[in-house]
Image (cartoon, rainbow, N blue to C red):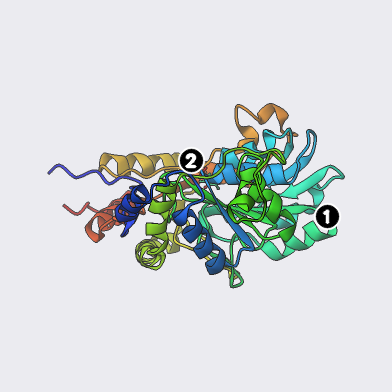
Amino acid sequence: MQLAPIPFNKPFLAGQELEYIRQALTNGKLSGNGYFTQQSQQFLQSRYGFVHALLTTSGTAALEMAALLLDIQPGDEVIMPSFTFTSTANAFVLRGAKIVFVDSLPNHPNLNTARLAELITPRTRAIVPVHYAGVACDMEPIMQLAQQHSLWVIEDAAQAIESTYRGRPLGAIGHLSALSFHETKNIISGEGGLLAVNDPYFAARAEIIWEKGTNRAAFFRGEVARYQWVDVGSSFLPSELIAAYLWGQLQRVEQIQQRRFAQWYQYYDALQELEQRGYCALPHIPDYAQHNAHIFYLRCRSQQERDGLIGHLSKQQILAVSHYQPLHASPYYASQHDGRTLPHATDHADCLIRLPLYYELDAPSQQRVIDAVTSFYTGASIRQ
Ligand SMILES: *Cc1c(COP(=O)(O)O)cnc(C)c1O
């Protein structure tokens, strides 16, 4: 029997996305900051308690806006985990910053808070915690340390919509935060993102940088007579077509999350025995974190075992994938890294495998994944 391939991820429609795109066309406004942009921004702002929210063309763009808002200068240092996506670092490297990488926790890819203080120098400007798999970093000590040393905290909450830290929404804790609506995230618009501004100090300037360095947003609100070039900036805002798609998804956020949680816990319950038998580790969720079912991953005992599992699943038409290669050892940055070994970041890169998890993953397909993982470890016969 030829098995249907199970992809790792699949973009999806949750409700009214196509209808809203049609409305955007009918409204006769396709550029940014129209009705659907406003709706989405207001929704996100009030649901998560951001002081200000600006839709962006990507999570990457939101991080780049954050680096501009911080006025990062060549030689400034920014601390972030090595186990993250290139955009976390690129946003600051583009402004000339030196990236100082901190290792992951042994049992979780998130940064090890206890190793931050030793990395702070007079040139340090910011700490960028990344909430891997939508699981919160330990934010309280990070915010305290930042306050002691007058540093900014930029949350890379690209994966963390709907997650909380001690009950507080992620993205609402740092001075600035980036969310992503890339098609691989929980809530999608193809490409897309959000800059959350939580420190009012940045609010006015964020809007100007967003709109090509002009005060056009204030002009639209009737606050200034004409709009002018008042600062640096770029085109960071998405078109209304993107915002319309996003609005369709945001309205269904609870339905989407409910489904992802069901899938996530299905994996967790079904694979728990493998962890109990010491084969592989399931995701660790600290007490302070409520996650968002963004990623279901396993940590294998070695790279060889992980690659073997990927191969075993692939033979059964199941696409499971590793994740980040540590940035401190990347072809681009290794020569600029200060040479410290970051063993836990390397370990997660070698041993982590992500299983298919997406809105339209049906129960029989998920069972196939569970059976295939189980048979890899136990040699049990594969269900036909
Ligand atoms: C997805 C992601 C980004 C980038 O977001 P885009 O919208 O794809 O630009 C940045 N950081 C992390 C941790 C991500 O997962």
In the image, what residue occupies the spot 61% across and 45% down? 210
Which residue bears the numbered disc 2? Answer: 303
Residue sticking out furthest to the right: 122
Q: Residues within 10 Å of mark 2 (few under 14, many from 20)?
A: some
187 over 56 or under it: above or below = below
256 over 215 or under it: above or below = below
- Residue kind at label 2, given as amino acid type: Gln
Which element carries disc 1, helix, strand or loop? loop
Q: Is mark 2 within 8 Å of ligand 1?
A: no
Residue 310: quadrant of the picture: top left
- Residue kind at label 1, given as amino acid type: Ser
Between 95 and 377, which is closer to the camera in this rendering? 95
Between 199 and 329, which is closer to the camera in this rendering? 199
Between 296 and 205, which is closer to the camera in this rendering? 205
Between 171 and 33, which is closer to the camera in this rendering? 33
Q: Residues within 10 Å of mark 1 (few under 14, many from 20)?
A: few
Q: Are marks 2 and 1 in contact (CB under 8 Å)?
A: no
Which residue bears the numbered disc 1? Answer: 150
Q: Which mark is residue 128?
A: none
Residue 195 at what x, y percent from top left?
59, 52
Residue sticking out furthest to the front: 225
Which element carries disc 2, helix, strand or loop? helix
Number of marks in picture: 2
Which of disc 1 and disc 2 is earlier in sequence?
A: 1
Residue 74 at what x, y percent from top left?
78, 33
- Side of 372 where 60 appears, left or right: right
3D distance between C-alphas at marks 2 and 1 = 40 Å
